Image (tube, helix red, strand yellow):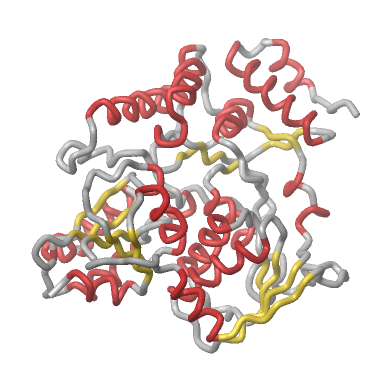
Amino acid sequence: MAVKLNKEEEAMLRGDHGEAPKIAMEVLMRLATAFGAEEFVPVSSVQAMAHYGSLHDAGLEWLEKLAALGGQCCVPTTQDPASVPLDKWESLGFDGAYAAKQKRLAQAIKELGEVLTWSCTPFNVGSIPRFGDNVAWAESSAVSYANSVIGARTNRTPAGLAICAAIAGRIPKERLYLDENRTATVKVNIDAGTLSTLDYNTIGIMLGKFAGTRIPALTGIPNTASSDQLKYLGASAASSGSVALYHILGVTPEAFDRDPFKGNKPAEEVTWTRQDLAAAEQALTTKNPGEIEHVVVGCPHYSIWELKTLAKLVAGKKLKKNKEFWVYTPFETESLAQRMGVLDVLKEAGIQILASNCLVISPYPRSHKTLMTDSGKFASYLPSEHHIELVYGSIENCVKAVTE
């Protein structure tokens, strides 16, 4: 079936608007054909990728080519964290040649007109879709948040496609842009009492392993669950599986007052108890951890509320000798924390803020063997990514492990 194009789309394909929009539409047309899309939908925002750790030379050259051809984002476009902390890579020991490639990427997306937020949490730095909006987001945790918590619509958009959507302002209407593909197919009942933030991470890890690419609906999650807790649930499920959309009965917008199964019976249903969560939590600590040398938190990026909580926990404390504590957060959140006095408390304790960065897509310029985190996503990726041992636990226990 041929893809229906409007006059603007036809003009872009002909090259009437320049070479970069033409290339972008050609790429998007291939995607539309591959997935059998009948038409395109406009997108209100794009969240792209510009970290060298994933794009490498091919991605760098691709973005530089589009910039050289005069490509411009025609909708608000943000990007994932960079592969080095852009303001302190040298002082932290990152390789200069590697950092130079990341800085070239930064220059390319600046020329393309992206908003330089450098965060995996665009919804915390000004890019907030409305319910039902079509967007083209790349970061898996942000995709989950947009689809599930906000009720916007996006697939897990690969990096090369995301910048094409930003330049063309549209994306093929397929998969999660279609009503019929947003129906829940499996059900998870949570019967574990009061849930901590760590529990939301753990449930997310369990959910990804159980659901895979399917769309789960959950019960037993209270409507008091915070934005950060749902952020962690989705990020963890997207890292241990490929969950791009989940529903929570009575909580998330597409399951608040309607049946996410649309009258269908779940293909599979499970119930998880406190014992199940405890076993999953224990399994996220690797088998041979040594003495904890380094705490890393902020995956997804810490919010201002989390920085405030951490500041309360470390007030009056200091890092133990030869211990490190890194927090990943957006530049905007770091600036707000500075104005609020939160940053002073963290720095006094010896905590290092790495704005714009993430250890998942970054080199690790340290020789530490055992790290600790409160993040399910970090727990999924870091042991294999950086060949380290990892201890998984609450932020309270992270603080206890390396401060006195």
Task: Locate residue 185 relative to residue 66 in the image: left or right.
Answer: right
Q: Is residue 305 visible to us here?
A: no
Question: Which residue does the image show at 78% across and 65% down from the upper left?
Answer: 185
Quadrant for residue 10, please give it: top right
Task: Specify the farthest residue to the left.
Answer: 321
Task: Locate residue 313 relative to residue 52 in the image: left or right.
Answer: left
Query: What x and y, as percent, mark residue 167?
Result: 58, 26
> Is 154 situated above or below 272?
above
Give whichever of 335, 62 is nearer the camera.
Answer: 62
Give whichever of 247, 227 is nearer the camera.
Answer: 247
> Is 145 situated above or below 57?
below
Task: Specify the farthest residue to the bottom.
Answer: 193
Query: What x and y, as percent, mark residue 213?
Result: 69, 55
Q: Where, quadrant-wise, is the C terminus in this rendering? A: bottom left
Query: What x and y, as percent, mark residue 123?
Result: 49, 53
Question: Which residue does the image show at 54% across and 89% down from the upper left?
Answer: 193
Question: Which residue does the image show at 72% across and 16% down from the upper left?
Answer: 13
Query: What x and y, as percent, mark residue 198?
Result: 43, 73
Q: Where, quadrant-wise, is the N terminus in this rendering? A: top right
